[in-house]
């Protein structure tokens, strides 16, 4: 027996070393450590402006009615052929109508797109251009957009095209034909003025919307609290009059932000609060606060698997406030803004918070956790108190994919708006109308406020009876906003993701809120 004793001892002595070294090495990497792709999205068509269309290119003609606009891009024979096709197809130039023609003259194709809105006298230059961008996505020819009258209309058409041609394809490796990257030229007599409008505002707005769509589309193994911070910080690099503040978990604990830290305590990826200030005007800032749950499993109150993949976009509110601020800063808008992204990953880890826990918030108010799946309102509770206390805004707007009930009530055409004061609601509704991102005001009835009160803490985050879900969520957030501060809450849970394409928002991430908040900030200053 003694001849086997020594080898056995060597084997036993080696086992602890193996047990210690291998798991330690494996656990030093969060996730797989292997990026899904190192490629960017495919290159989009660059936008330019000119008084004359490039020869022999494809034409997109924006139509105000059934009459073909005057243009030097069509010869007399080509014009006659197009007019005959219009008459044959009974094309009226109404919004949503398109007529695609091929084989006419030297043009690879001619696409007619209606700009006339039946419900008003206004013309919609953005939507037909966006629809055309999607329809012609893989047409590998130069495009010219004709028919928009005046510099503003031309810039709007360019914006529509830029928004419509968005794609998130960086993870697709087996595509037979990639989208075209050949240029698109918006043609008209006011090309120079339109170019100036594009360069000064519209271009930055389009780029900011599409940055937000990228953030929404990225999987949660790519976008988590710290990588969100890194990605957005890189977008602001070199932009003037901007200051960025980042709070990590240690900093937030020191300030008793138990709500946001509590949401993220089940995840190995730490929570963050990102605050971006842009100083372009005078007076107090407008505050924008966004829910930034980079993935929401529901925590201990775990969601069913069906549809859980879409919870990668539960940070859409945080992305929207950052996108709007980026657009305002890059266009040097004469406004002051403070935007806060409340970022956490809601996971059911061993250290996750439990139903029944009570957490303390930045302002000292307490919350009873009845469902860990009602987490967005928790991170916003700390965020709105912090930004109001530290930055003294003249008004506050929060935006969040907060409740499924708002989507069931309003579908995918409207986001829900809640406000204590009618004059605040009207300001936000006006900005929504101008931007084309639509809102519907829902009730913030005082009776619903009683429903969120807790028996053992100040308020409870779920288990509310007697109040509609979206209204209860709004009341919960409003509890942490001083009644003297003008405030609006936007619930975008029904509009953050498109199940099918719309003219300005291709299927997938919508980027909702960037255009609306950009417009609101320009219209609403102290």
Image (cartoon, rainbow, N blue to C red):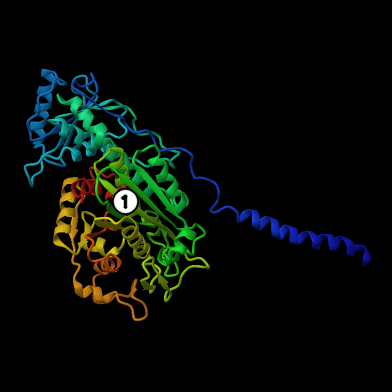
Residue 224 sits above or below residue 95 on the image: below
Q: Nearer the viewer, residue 218 or 346?
A: 346
User: In the displayed structure, does residue 185 sit left or right of residue 232?
Assistant: left
Q: Looking at the rendering, in which quadrant would you find the N terminus? A: bottom right
One can see residue 161 in this view:
no
Pinpoint residue 101: horizontal percent, then vertical percent. 19, 29
The residue under the point 35% across, 54% down is 340
The residue under the point 23% across, 18% down is 55
Pinpoint residue 504: horizontal percent, then vertical percent. 24, 43
One can see residue 440 in this view:
yes
The residue under the point 29% across, 46% down is 324
Q: Which residue is mark 1?
A: 338
Q: Nearer the viewer, residue 310 or 343?
A: 343
Q: Secondary structure at mark 1?
A: strand
User: In the displayed structure, does residue 477 sit left or right of residue 187?
Assistant: right
Q: Residue furthest front?
A: 283
How would you rate the neighbour count of disc 1 (Cα within 10 Å): few for under 14, some for 14-19, many for 20 or more? many
Residue 139 sits above or below residue 30 on the image: above
User: In the displayed structure, does residue 181 sit left or right of residue 427?
Assistant: right
Find residue 247 and report its image quarter: bottom left
Q: Nearer the viewer, residue 485 or 190?
A: 485
């Amino acid at each position: 027996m003694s001849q086997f004793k020594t080898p056995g001892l060597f084997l036993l002595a080696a086992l602890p070393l193996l047990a210690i070294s291998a798991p330690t090495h494996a656990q030093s990497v969060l996730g797989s450590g292997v990026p899904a792709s190192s490629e960017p999205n495919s290159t989009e068509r660059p936008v330019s402006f000119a008084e004359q269309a490039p020869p022999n290119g494809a034409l997109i003609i924006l139509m105000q009615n059934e009459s073909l606009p005057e243009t030097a891009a069509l010869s007399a024979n080509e014009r006659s052929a197009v007019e005959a096709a219009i008459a044959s197809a009974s094309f009226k130039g109404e919004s949503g109508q398109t007529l695609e023609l091929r084989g006419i003259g030297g043009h690879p194709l001619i696409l007619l797109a209606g700009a006339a809105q039946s419900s008003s006298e206004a013309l919609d230059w953005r939507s037909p251009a966006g629809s055309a961008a999607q329809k012609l996505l893989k047409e590998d020819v130069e495009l010219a957009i004709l028919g928009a009258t005046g510099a503003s209309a031309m810039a709007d058409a360019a914006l529509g095209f830029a928004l419509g041609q968005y794609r998130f394809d960086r993870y697709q490796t087996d595509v037979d034909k990639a989208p075209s990257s050949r240029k698109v030229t918006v043609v008209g007599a006011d090309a120079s003025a339109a170019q100036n409008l594009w360069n000064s505002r519209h271009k930055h707005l389009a780029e900011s919307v599409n940055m937000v769509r990228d953030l929404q589309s990225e999987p949660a193994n790519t976008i988590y609290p710290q990588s969100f911070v890194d990605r957005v910080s890189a977008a602001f690099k070199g932009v003037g009059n901007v200051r960025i503040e980042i709070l990590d978990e240690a900093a937030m604990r020191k300030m008793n932000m138990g709500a946001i830290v509590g949401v993220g305590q089940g995840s190995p990826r730490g929570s963050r609060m990102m605050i971006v200030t842009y100083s372009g005007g005078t007076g107090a800032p407008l505050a924008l606060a966004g829910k930034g749950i980079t993935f929401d499993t529901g925590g201990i109150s775990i969601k069913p698997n069906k549809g859980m993949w879409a919870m990668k976009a539960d940070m859409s509110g945080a992305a929207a406030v950052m996108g709007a601020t980026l657009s305002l800063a890059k266009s040097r808008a004469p406004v002051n803004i403070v935007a806060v992204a409340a970022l956490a990953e809601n996971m059911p880890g061993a250290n996750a918070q439990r139903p029944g826990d009570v957490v303390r918030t930045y302002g000292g108010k307490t919350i009873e956790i009845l469902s860990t799946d009602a987490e967005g309102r928790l991170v916003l509770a700390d965020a709105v108190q912090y930004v109001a206390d530290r930055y003294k805004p003249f008004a506050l707007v929060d935006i969040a994919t907060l409740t499924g009930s708002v989507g069931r009530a309003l579908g995918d055409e409207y986001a829900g708006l809640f406000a204590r004061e009618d004059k605040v609601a009207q300001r936000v509704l006006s900005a929504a109308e101008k931007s084309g991102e639509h809102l519907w005001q829902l009730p913030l009835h005082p009776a619903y406020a009683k429903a969120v009160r807790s028996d053992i803490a100040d308020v409870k985050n779920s288990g509310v009876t007697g109040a509609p879900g979206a209204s209860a969520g709004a009341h919960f957030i409003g509890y942490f906003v001083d009644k003297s501060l003008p405030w609006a809450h936007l619930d975008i849970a029904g509009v953050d993701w498109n199940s099918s394409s719309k003219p300005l928002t291709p299927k997938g991430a919508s980027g909702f809120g960037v255009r609306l908040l950009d417009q609101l900030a320009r219209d609403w200053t102290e």
